[in-house]
Image (cartoon, coloured by chain):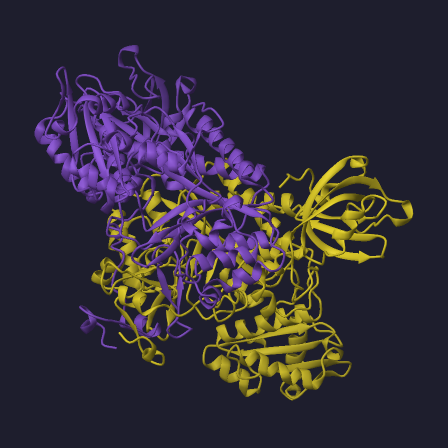
Chain colours: A purple, B yellow
Amino acid sequence: MIGRTHECGKLGEEHVGERVQLKGWVQRRRDLGQVIFLDVRDRSGIVQVVFNPEVNQEALTTAERVRNEYVIEVCGNVVARDPKTVNEKIATGSIEVHVEKISILNASKPLPFQIEADTDASEDVRLKYRYLDLRRPDMQETFKLRHRTTKLIRDFLDTETFMEIETPMLTKSTPEGARDYLVPSRVHHGEFYALPQSPQLFKQLLMVSGFERYYQIVRCFRDEDLRADRQPEFTQVDIETSFMDKEDLIAMMEKMMEKILKEIKGVDISLPFPRLTYDEAMNRFGSDKPDLRFGMELIELSEIVKDSEFKVFQSALASGGTVKGLNLKGGADKLSRKEIDALTDYVKQYGAKGLAWLKVEEEGLKGPIAKFFTGEVATSLQEALGAEVGDLLFFGADKKQVVFDSLGALRLKFGKQFDLIDKSQFNFLWVVDFPLVEYDEEAKRYVALHHPFTSPVEEDLALLATDPASVRANAYDLVLNGYELGGGSQRIYQSDIQEQMFKALGFSEEEAREQFGFLLEAFEFGTPPHGGIALGLDRLIMLLAGRTNLRDTIAFPKTASASDLLTNAPGEVSVEQLIDLNLSIIGRKSEKVNV
Amino acid sequence: MIGRTHECGKLGEEHVGERVQLKGWVQRRRDLGQVIFLDVRDRSGIVQVVFNPEVNQEALTTAERVRNEYVIEVCGNVVARDPKTVNEKIATGSIEVHVEKISILNASKPLPFQIEADTDASEDVRLKYRYLDLRRPDMQETFKLRHRTTKLIRDFLDTETFMEIETPMLTKSTPEGARDYLVPSRVHHGEFYALPQSPQLFKQLLMVSGFERYYQIVRCFRDEDLRADRQPEFTQVDIETSFMDKEDLIAMMEKMMEKILKEIKGVDISLPFPRLTYDEAMNRFGSDKPDLRFGMELIELSEIVKDSEFKVFQSALASGGTVKGLNLKGGADKLSRKEIDALTDYVKQYGAKGLAWLKVEEEGLKGPIAKFFTGEVATSLQEALGAEVGDLLFFGADKKQVVFDSLGALRLKFGKQFDLIDKSQFNFLWVVDFPLVEYDEEAKRYVALHHPFTSPVEEDLALLATDPASVRANAYDLVLNGYELGGGSQRIYQSDIQEQMFKALGFSEEEAREQFGFLLEAFEFGTPPHGGIALGLDRLIMLLAGRTNLRDTIAFPKTASASDLLTNAPGEVSVEQLIDLNLSIIGRKSEKVNV
């Protein structure tokens, strides 16, 4: 094999007259009988090569056998194209290569779909033939972007004196958080490792070790039922620091994001990022990761409607709930009665029992519940909602969380449906002052909203024993365009506060010791104040690449049922493997494994 | 918390007169009554801070409560030390900080061992308190070296236009190679993922995808019985390229190693690295990863002794084996008869039935078997072995592999025992022309020496069907100081050759399709010629750091029984977790999990 002299996409007029050797894939073939044109593609781009009996008959004969996606090696001279045949669409369009010699390095069967930016192949077919899907130019671009972003993050953190330190993948199952993926031990009968949901414990231990600035771009695992924007294994930019406080860390992350946006997208973003408290984010946008690229805020109406005779509002307020409204500007003409009714089903997914609405017409409010809102109340309602003729008003009345969830979802739905979102924007914000814990109805105890090592805000410390739900966490989530990009917090570093926290979470001292004993013990040997953050790399890449499907940012992703359609993982294993692990399968398939 | 102004280890005479704020751990405390000295340590180093009533009485009072490994914050002035009290042993020894204010950020219990370069704590204690062990300066240095080496590798590969692409951790179990770690699927009843032994299949698929240059620093897993230089999870610098041949790849790797040695160790190494064929390495050093930092080669003696009357030699040769010798120069005085006898037990580990030996004395050869070697045979033996008076000669006579293994091990043992190895050397070499396959007595079939995707040397292709054992692989192992640092090869990229290979390995077409069908199918869609290499990062760091224990290069390593003594992983899991996975434990502990 002779080495190639140039990459296809990098040839230009400056190479005219040079003899070049290229290697790549046949993107397209046009056979004009006496002349054959091939578009040859490598990872740098495409160039046209020409076979013609005046240059070399043997090469032309070989080229007749070539088909799309054959791998070839060609040797020839770079020639300027006739101005009339210049192809403006490709970077190398002003030249072509007149081929003297061609070798077919490998053949290709006809493809299940074409290698083009836009494919109409189904996602299942694309995943089964992922190696072909990855040849498509938009996928190549996404993974170049991923590589460059990753490199930039590493360089930035290296400059900030962070050290990359690797933490274990085979670790211990912990009861908090999501469901663990387990790995049976062969040596330790009946025991299991767990794959990490994050390196949380280890990165805190590294702070106890005095490394001061740790980072890792690391695979994490959650065995959860999957949504479109979740994968069973995902990649996290994991950061932990000692002796840096919340403001130091936030400023550093903003600097990193500024650099990424500038170098990867050529976009200037302004610092510092805005901040919203959790309460404000929920009240105004119904979400702890609000998309601020458009308005349409949720408006508090409880006070205005408290005396109305509409029973739905009354009972919501009577049971401690809230009433909020949303104004779809000019919506009266945009949605039919049928479409409005369908929205009721939509909000029911979020726990709402129904969806009240009103149209604003010249004559006043119209709609099934208009009769309950007349006179001053109607005026106040319209004022509060900034309602004008032609607007469509929606109402949520229920427990606070249900109103947040349903109207928040409705807001996003309208934003997309009516194109209210400026897609060129990269809109960052921090959400702060999260509750430290929330009550889990099922477990009948408080659970940590972030994780049990998140520090309470200092002023709220005393409340931890008496009123945990009102304690704010010293935590900060980074939000980009309505996606949670990452979550950070200052950690509890004093063992007495950590013990109080476990107590608030309903752990007995024994349970806490059993689960986290090594961490509690470590905290007794001189633990520095520390904090950190974890950013979802897959999600960041998705947003930078302007994509909406997380799977397009992962080379070999899994489906919603956590399958790999390419390799057919997971799969059955041999009886010998199960015996080695002292396991048997119960239920449906047990007859297959006679152990 | 006020930010720190300087790192401890970076203070020097240029800071004299400045007011500084430091944060760190108390390395040492000397209480002289009216004056207290603390050595404060952060990750940059150590500085002495002084408490003294003339500067601040309150600070002195607080300092009285401070003990080793407390985390403190101090504020004070940098003062030049009296020339008589300058401490040459530490970088900051010419100055000290006179403290005006101290805050205790956290206390520490007395430590189970001291934070010193040399510790006499057992490895088990060090692993249990790993977070303290990692505070020791030599461990900190090792992980700094690991970070810098990793960064350098990434930068080098980025410059060489490699892209970092991540491959899955939850993948499919394959029957070839080592034992897989399995991960039960909750969604797919009775099915399992496997953790990757390497991203081999995925990196080849990325070549089919046209990425051309891929790299990843990636965790790999092998559920094997562990030796001192193995870990169940280990990190690999994984590289794959298209359109680069063996010489291109070897040259690039040499350039990378040259850069690492230069920048990390300040050592110049000469390129190109020497190469040995597999046969030569085995014959001369009894190893496919020979340590060339010293001589003492194995000497072929079969021809010389073929007519001797020593039955052991005769029967070895008669059954197709070999006789080789090893000369321990001046060994006659170095080893007692008892020690020589003990070596017999040593070589028995490697399958040898015994160990013949001879001393070279003024009067000739002496020892139990001397009577068999007299006259011309004795002379020839001595000549072949370069034997002089005072030397001690050892002989191996058995099947070739047994002779290689036992004398190769003996050679290394002597090299260490008698300090024949220049430890300052970084001795690289390539071992090439490995056999493609070897016969597995247990499985009664050929198995791939590297993996089933390794390309045969082109000239040997025809032998694949008729005499697989004689086919050489287009493979190259990189060896450093007697350790296999990595293995690379050109891959089979033509599906017909891949099918021949599977046939040689005794796979039916159906078995091959079932296990590797997706790869065989991928190869039909225009696969470029490709090859790659994988380097063991942990091992590279171990050698660069001048260490001998692989565990010292991994932040949270596992013991020989694959346990993590810090977190107590693996551990038992709940019955609910097992039910979720449709698993039950068979045998000893099954009564605990009543499913």
B416 sits left or right of A10 in the view: right
x, y (%) of residue B193?
31, 59
x, y (%) of residue B379?
68, 77
- Kindly indicate the quadrant of the structure image that contains residue A175: bottom left
- Residue B78 versus residue B534: which sits nearer the camera? B78
Measuring 42% from the left and 48% from the top, which residue is drawn there? A450
* Residue A86 to residue A356: above or below: above
- Kindly indicate the quadrant of the structure image that contains residue A402: top left
x, y (%) of residue A422?
31, 23
Q: Quadrant of the C terminus of chain B?
A: bottom left
Q: Residue furthest right?
A: B84
x, y (%) of residue A584?
27, 73
- Is residue B276 in view from this perspective? no
* Residue A189 to residue B337: above or below: above
- Is residue B8 in view from this perspective? yes
Measuring 30% from the left and 32% from the top, which residue is drawn there? A138
A214 sits left or right of B521 in the view: right
- Residue B133 versus residue B400: which sits nearer the camera? B133
- Residue A151 versus residue B570: which sits nearer the camera? B570
Q: Quadrant of the N terminus of chain B?
A: top right
Measuring 54% from the left and 36% from the top, which residue is drawn there? A247
* Residue B1 to residue B237: above or below: above
